Image (cartoon, helix red, strand yellow):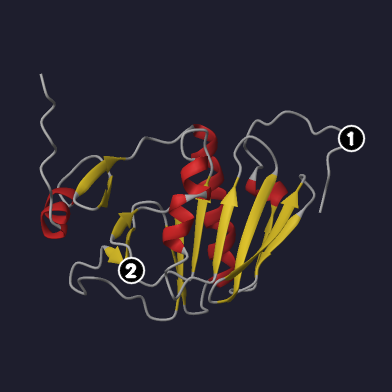
Amino acid sequence: MTAQPRPYLTETEYLERERVSTIKHEYYAGELFAMSGASEAHNLIASSVNASIYAQIRGRGCRIYPSDMRIKIVKTGLYTYPDITIVCGTPEFTDMTKRDTLLNPTIILEILSPSTERYDRGVKFQNYRTIASLKEYILIAQNKHHIERYTRYEENTWILTEAVGVDSVITLESIQCALALADVYELVDLPPESPSEDRT
C-alpha cells in the first residue's frame, strides 16, 4: 500500500492549529514537525539562564522570552521555538495584536540534547543566520560545563568563542551580560571534571 502524502498546510492554517494545540510544532514548507519535551537538566539550565540574564538586562530595554515564544524566519519560512530568545529594542511580531510570533531576535540560545544537537548546529543555525537582527547564537551543553557563543561580525562572518569548565564565564557581548557556568549548571548533576579538562 502506498503511503498517503501529508496534506500541505499554509502558514495561516499552521498558526490556527498551533494556537489551540497542546503540543508545539515547527513549521516548514507546508509541514508540521512535533517538538519533543525537555529533560530535567534542560529545564534547570533554562531557568538559571533566564534568571541570570533577566537580572542583568532589567530596565535596559531588552526582553527575554522562554521556549513558548515562537519565531518566524522570514527568508526561509521556518517557524520554530528557540529555548530562550532575547530582543533589545522594540519587538516586532507577525501579528501585532496576538504578539505570539516574533520576527527580530537579538540573541537566540539553544540547550543541546542528543536528539537536537545536530539540527541546532546545522540546518537550524543556517536558518537563524538569515535573520538580519540576530547578533549572537548561544549553544549550551547539558551534559558538561560547556557554552559556545557565535557572534556576528559581518553579514556572513560568525566568530566562535567557547567557555569550558565550571569556573568559566562567557559574555553576551551584544547585551553586555555575563553567564557564569557555575551559576548556569548549579543544580544540574554532572560528573566531576577531570584535572586535565581544558578551560577558557
For disc 2, the marked residue is: 75
Tag 2 secondary structure: loop
Left or right: 4 in relation to 37? left
| Residue 83 visible to the viewer | no
Name the amino acid type tagged 1. Answer: Pro
Say which quadrant the C terminus sits in. Answer: bottom right
For disc 1, the marked residue is: 195
Percent coordinates x, y for residue 90 in the rendering: 38, 80
Residue at 18% of width from left, 51% of height from top?
30
Residue at 47% of width from left, 79% of height from top?
61
| Residue 176 visible to the viewer | yes
Q: Nearer the viewer, mark 1 or mark 2?
A: 2
Q: Residues within 10 Å of mark 2 (few under 14, many from 20)?
A: few
Left or right: 90 in relation to 48? left
**Pointers 1 and 2 in contact (CB under 8 A)?**
no
**Above or below, 173 relative to 121:** below
| Residue 51, numbered label | none
Name the amino acid type tagged 2. Answer: Lys
Say which quadrant the N terminus sits in. Answer: top left
User: CA separation, marks 1 and 2?
Assistant: 46 Å
Percent coordinates x, y for residue 111 in the rendering: 53, 46
Circle nearer the N terminus (1, 2): 2
